[in-house]
Image (spheres, rainbow, N blue to C red):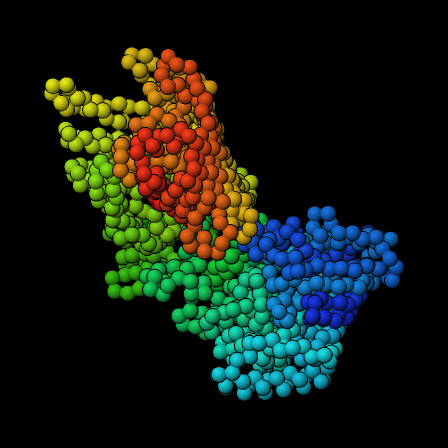
Amino acid sequence: MIKYILTVTSILISLSSFGQDYFQQEVDYDIKVKLIDSIHTLEGDIKITYKNNSPDALSEIYMHLWGNAFKNRTTAFAKQKVRSFNTDFYYAEEEELGFYSNLDFKVNGNSVTWKLDEENIDIGKITLSQPLGPGETITISTPFSLRIPNSYSRLGHVETSYQMTQWFPKPAVYDRNGWHQMPYLDMGEFYSEFGDFNVEITLPENYYVGATGLLQNESEKAFLKERIKYTDQYLLDTLRDHSAYPASSMKMKTLKYTAERVHDFAWFADKRFLVQKDVATLSSGKDVDCWVFFTDLEKDLWKDGAFYVKRAVEFYSERVGDYPYPHATAVQSALSAGAGMEYPMITVIGRSVTAPALDQVITHEVGHNWFYGILASNERDFPWMDEGMNSYHDHKYTSIYYDDYDEAGGIMPKKIERQMEYSTLSLAYQVWARIGKDQAPNTTSNDLTTLNYFLGAYEKPAMAFKLLENYIGEEQLVTAMRKYYDEWKFRHPQPEDTKASFEHSTGLDLDWLFDGMLFSNQVYDYKVKSINLNEGTIEIENNGMVAAPINLTYYTDTAVGETVWYDGFLGSKKLPLVNKEVKIVELDKERISLDIKPSNNDYKIKGGAVGSKLKLRWLSGLTTSKTEKIFMLPIIGFNSADQLQVGIAFHNYGIPLSNFQYYIQPGVGSRDGSLIGSFEFRRDFPQRTGKLRNVSIALGGKSFHESYNERFDYSLRFTRIQPSIEFEWKDKLVSPIAHYVRYRPIGIVTENARIGRETGFEGKDRNLAIIHNAEYNYLRRSPIAPLDVKVNTEFQQYKRGDATKRYLKLYASADAKYAYKKGKFFEIRGFAGFFPLHTEGDISTSAAIGNFSMFSRGFNDYRYDQHFIDRNGQEGFFTRQVAIADGGFKNGITNSMPIGLSNKYLASINLAIDLPFGWSKMLPIKPYFDAGVYSYKATTSEPFQQEVLYSGGLMIDFQKTIMIHFPLFNSERITNIYEQTAANYWQRISFTIDINKLNPHGLKHWFLR
Ligand SMILES: [Zn+2]
């Protein structure tokens, strides 16, 4: 009786929390297939019984035909792979592709109209001849022949090892939000209807098969039993190698499987499989068979695989709910998407390298039986619901069974990790959240960047649930989790259902967890502001939007005091001081919060906020410590005027990066010992929402000598100060296309020597130039066809004698590359510019200011954008440094020759191509060809002349940072100059060193783009 009342109560609660419109469709399958391994093809028939439990009449059924995802380069899967810079599938051979043929859908045995989706050929739509009413059932049937692709994701094969996942036509989910048809993706998982499966697989007799569902053939059970015995012996004999593929038997066998209340069916077949088995015993008394199928590849790790499966099944059954299926199986097989992949009752694992890593991956994948298999959320749209809640559990498992095992899979060296106050994962979140590049975990998979899929779907929710666990206590959390499982098992929970279930069972308002940490990418940063011992209060401030709970630990002179939890809040709040003997308080002592700036978490009664203390460290490192750090870097450089330069760079580029960055690099040159160097201060304002991603303001400067006069022994110095502002736009964070607008006024002070005819060197005059430069930059990242377009406008006003002169200059460049084969590019760069306004447009080019240049050399780098070793020299190897700017020619023609400059217009094209050979990756020799046209005036009285130049040769190109150019043929004018200056071949070789790419800001862009 009591039981009866309880049941009624829980049904009432269930009804209120599910909402009354909850329904789910029922889809049962009868599948018969035959594997023809000689042509990697699966042939068979499928019959689907579809019951419409919705209140709606359905006039169409959407089908997932995910085998077609591997048909060509234009599928959503193929595009996503390219977007994540993996071009393996893009360059796949014709015979490696996969797709269906001979699909012929019938409904209740009658032909129907059906077609492939225009955008996604792996989605089909069946139009029903009459609508399927509520409560009605139809059968959908079709023959199908699947060409199995090579292993490029999940479904595939390597030789005769088969990974049969997403292999059969399958209806999409229809739920209270309508149809959820979706193309197959590599990063982005599944959403399927529950039902029962009867599957018959015919294949050569000597295959071992692991599958969803319960094997029905007694003969096959005996066959596997024999294999277990064989494997026991085999594992003792370390010398034997079992990696070759045996020939397929001519005799076939038909295996029968049944599975109930699952939403997918996967199987893996390999003639080499070794087999082991264990049994998990649940606290309910139920036994679950735990199988592993594996090859020779990592057999030393897999010998304990069945035990890992067993331990994982028992762990999840305790913490979430009883495992409802007859077996749990892990298979080691080919997988080209992540470390492991889950299917009901069975999971596939790739290479693991170490035993703890294998245990962790098996546990995670087995755990998906709960978070995906039984609690069948929409993984595609809400990946945190399975990955995040599952990761929380597998991290828990790891922390119980391994003392010293890193949740991030050991990517952080142990030596560094011991110095870290935070786990690698927590640190990774801080790095990304601080620069505003994190995304809400509740973002559909294809809109998440690869890193945010890892952080947002897996790790941030795992950390959030761990915080909840610490806040409410472990027992409470397990109770809430089990309640959630009971309410939603074999159903499709939506995010709001999960929130409602947890709020209901804990009795807490969990907005901070769900709305704050999962449904948005809002951040928070608690800080101790002050302690008032007289008042007995402690004031804490939250600089953020998430009112997460916090804990404070009180330290006295003699002991670590108690840790007290407080409910979260926004803004400032005074809390009662628990211990008045306190000397230090520490926020979040156990380092489990998602506070993005923990360095302000401590407070000393005498001395105030801890964290104001500065520490000097070499190179770079972690900045999460309780102290602010200044990093130092020894700097050695060289230019012809200063000679050897030595200095120390002080900077704060550490991990995580602060939004305020600086480097100050003072030094001295060995020529005269005077101060030289450079600096930059930069403040980023990351925009967490909207299309504008970042606004950044900066102030940079540098001062070096640019020439040295030996006769009179003086050096001339240049000093540049450059404030700047930059805006970054991006449609979506995941988009490969970004737009930037930058504006910078450049102030340059240069020196000229006054030389008297009699007196010699008399002193220096200083000259100030201010150049305004605005740039629009369109950037498309792609492993196939990247593009970088820059449009510039530049204005300068200057004095010529007493007259004020000015020019306005417009120019644009486009850098495009196209991969003609994998990793081998054809490069084309175009440049064009002219002066819409030039008050000195009619004087001789050599006297004009702000000229375009075909050969970008030290003496015409009037914005002082580049670093030149010998900026103004006339001869010697270092004078042959060229920058890839303006015309982009690579000839290091001496400064004294007036060629290639224009105060009117200049246009050019630069071509280069990677050689198609493998060795050219190590020694990147490329043929190149430059051609350009420009207009110049030899003297003020002569008219403008147009001149065409070209030059071609070979270059060695190390990532455009260090390049050496060997010109082989040139237009006549260039050849003439080489001959006039008596340049032998060695003296025609030029080089490029672009150290702008190596400064901290350049490196930051490279790492964090
Ligand atoms: Zn997972």
| Front residue of this view, candidates 352 and 41 | 41
Give coordinates of residue 287: x percent, y percent.
62, 81
Q: Which residue lies furthest to the left in this view?
A: 759
Between 78 and 753, the one lying in front of the other is 753
Residue ID at (62%, 80%): 289
What x and y, as percent, mark residue 697?
39, 35
The mark total stands at 0
* Residue drawn where x is 78% and y is 59% of the image: 103
Q: Can residue 405 be seen in this view?
A: yes
Residue plotted at (69% across, 79% down): 249
Q: Residue at x 49, y 76 (%)?
A: 301
Q: Position of residue 467 (x, y in %)?
A: 47, 60
Does 354 appear above or below 746? below
Residue 73 versus residue 274: which sits nearer the camera? 73
Coordinates of residue 489 in the picture (x, y in percent): 65, 66
Q: Say whether residue 798 is left or right of residue 426.
A: left
592 is higher (above) or lower (below) than 677: below
Quarter of image, res 904: top left
Q: Is residue 302 above or below residue 504?
A: below
Q: Can residue 571 be seen in this view?
A: no
Q: In this view, does 215 lie to the left or right of 864?
A: right
Toward which corner of the image does residue 1 lie, by quadrant? bottom right
